[in-house]
Amino acid sequence: MTSQTMSRTHHLQLPLDVAAVNELAVGDMVLLSGDITISIGLPTHKRMMQDLQAGHDLPLNLHGGAFFHLSAYLQDGVGDQATEALYMNPSTSTRYNPYMPTIIRSLGLRLAGGKGGLDADSVAAMQETGCAYLSFLGGGCTQLSESIESVVSTHWNEYISQFRLTTLRVKDLGPATVAIDAHGNSIYETLRKQAQARMPQILEELKQRRHS
């Protein structure tokens, strides 16, 4: 995104088609409503990848959906009481780099997200399928949790609640930043290049200060 390009705010309703995702540009803001699936479990991601590679169906239909690295503590319902998500908070996505390219491609995800971004292999998979990465505010637990309307379903419940495949219905989740768009543009890659470009100058300034 150039400095002349103004970022936009998108109010999106899931599920999304490829055309809607292609409209998102790095730096845009998103408020999201609909059903999202979340998990922060490393064993969960490994299990998802292995099942998909083996041609097995997951216990829920994530094709064309949104899968986020968000943590939620679930209070399981008793009797007629519904299961309740007590909070929601983002986790660092880079931990899942070994699994996300397979998950993105196999499911044709439209949105991924968390915090910290994903690696180049994941970005390539996102370009192929038409998927964008949303960056959620670290420490924004209170604001994010207010968007939760209900727990739609939970799967692989033998895991602790934060590791389960949990689907939540949300309203105006965010605001989240489009940090990687479906065209391969990445805030993280831009910042990395800027930092590398500045490094010689920084080292030279430090050298001069040591000898001043």
Image: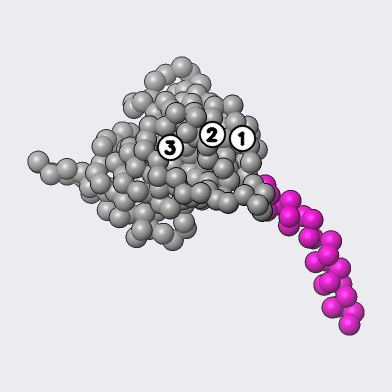
Q: Is the residue 199 above or below the residue 46 in the image?
A: below
| Residue 201 located within the stretch drawn in magenta | yes
Distance (Cα) linking label 1 and label 3: 19 Å
Q: Under tag 2, what secondary structure?
A: helix
Left or right of 202, for residue 164: left
Q: Residue furthest bottom?
A: 212
- Could you say which is closer to the camera, residue 205 or residue 11? 11
The percent position of residue 161, horizontal first and vertical second, equals: 32, 45
Observer-side mark, 1 or 3, equals 1
In the picture of the structure, the residue carrying the numbered disc 1 is 183
| Residue type for callout 1 | His
Write down the region rendered in magenta.
188-212
| Residue type for callout 3 | Phe
* Mark number, residue 67: 3
The percent position of residue 96, horizontal first and vertical second, equals: 53, 40
Q: Earlier in the sequence, mark 2 or mark 3?
A: 2
| Residue type for callout 2 | Asn
Q: Main secondary structure of the magenta part?
A: helix
| Residue 101 lies in quadrant | top right
Q: Counting other residues with Cα less than 10 Å from the Cα at mark 1, is it few (<14), some (14-19), or many (20 or more)? A: many
User: CB under 8 Å between callouts 2 and 1?
Assistant: yes
The percent position of residue 154, horizontal first and vertical second, equals: 29, 36
Q: Counting other residues with Cα less than 10 Å from the Cα at mark 2, is it few (<14), some (14-19), or many (20 or more)? A: some
In the picture of the structure, the residue carrying the numbered disc 2 is 22
Residue 117 appears in the picture as rendered: no
| Residue 203 located within the stretch drawn in magenta | yes
